[in-house]
Image (spheres, rainbow, N blue to C red):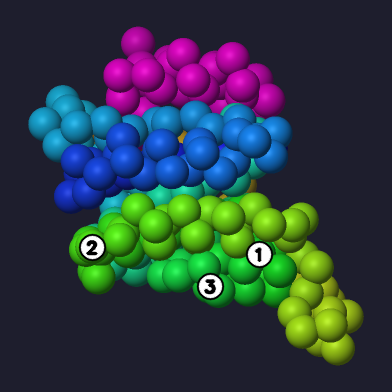
Amino acid sequence: MRIALINENSQAAKNGMIFEQLKAVAEPKGHEVVNYGMYTADQDNQLTYPMVGLLTAILINSGAADFVVTGCGTGEGAMLACNIYPNVLCGHVVDASDAYLFTQINDGNAIAIPFAKGFGWGAELNLRYIFEQLLACPGGGGYPPERVVPEQANKKVLDGLKEITHVDMMTILKNVDQEFLKTTIGGPNFAELFFPNCRDSEMAAYLKSVLE
């Protein structure tokens, strides 16, 4: 599984620490971790949490990432921004039990963490425990055991509703403010991380034209 990390501007200074904790847990399990930044608080393209949502949707819908770890100060804004898009199911994760229950019950493909609220002494340990439980076992297994069947059925219903209530990603990319889109994908390493892994040729061509 390819896991992407995205930080918005208010929490960019923590990117390196979050990346190291995620890699330490994910890589021994055979997952690839890619860091889309922001890498520093003074980076030229300032990613806001609405941009984090759009970037998450681009990565998931293009196949460039299978899972996205993101967040903001409270995690709420990033979660809401991610969930407005098709094929993105983002949970708000505060601690390790949240991470485990979200993956087992909701089987989503993104999480939003509060990187400021309660982020004090031992914060790196909390992150490590979150990532350990996030990747403890394949998603969708259900919890508790007697609730597995209805939970899996509800997940299928939710996925079907998202297909009905959302327009396709290419329509979104063409209709969104193009400067907003260009800033969203204008990070220093976006092109080298994204295009070799993108599985949607139409989306790749369009995003290349935006960056030109």
Secondary structure type for disc 3: helix
Structural distance between the alpha carbons of marks 3 and 2: 20 Å
Crowd tier of the residue under label 2, counting other residues whose Cα lies within 10 Å: few below 14, some 14–19, many 20 or above: few
Task: Please state the horizontal and vertical placement of residue 212, each as a whole percent of the image.
Answer: 35, 11
Please report whichever mark, 1 or 3, sits nearer to the chain's N-terminal start. Answer: 3
Query: Residue at 53% of width from left, 73% of height from top?
Result: 98
Reply yes or no: does residue 23 show up in magenta. Answer: no
Mark number displayed over residue 98: 3
Give amino acid for label 3. Asp
Please report whichever mark, 1 or 2, sits nearer to the chain's N-terminal start. Answer: 1
- The mark lying in front, picked from 1 and 2, is 2
Task: Please state the horizontal and vertical placement of residue 159, each as a whole percent of the image.
Answer: 72, 65
Instruction: Report the span colored magenta.
Output: 184-212
Secondary structure type for disc 2: loop
Give amino acid for label 1. Thr
- Residues 174 and 98: in front is 98
Circle 1 residue = 103
Query: Residue at 64% of width from left, 41% of height from top?
Result: 66
Mark number displayed over residue 74: none
Q: Residue furthest top?
A: 212
- Residues 77 and 207: in front is 77
Circle 2 residue = 121
Query: In terms of image quadrants, where is residue 105?
Result: bottom right
Give amino acid for label 2. Trp
Q: Vertical placement of 178 versus 89: above or below?
A: above
Task: Please state the horizontal and vertical placement of residue 67, each as a whole percent of the image.
Answer: 59, 45
- The mark lying in front, picked from 3 and 2, is 2
Structural distance between the alpha carbons of marks 1 and 2: 26 Å
Crowd tier of the residue under label 3, counting other residues whose Cα lies within 10 Å: few below 14, some 14–19, many 20 or above: some
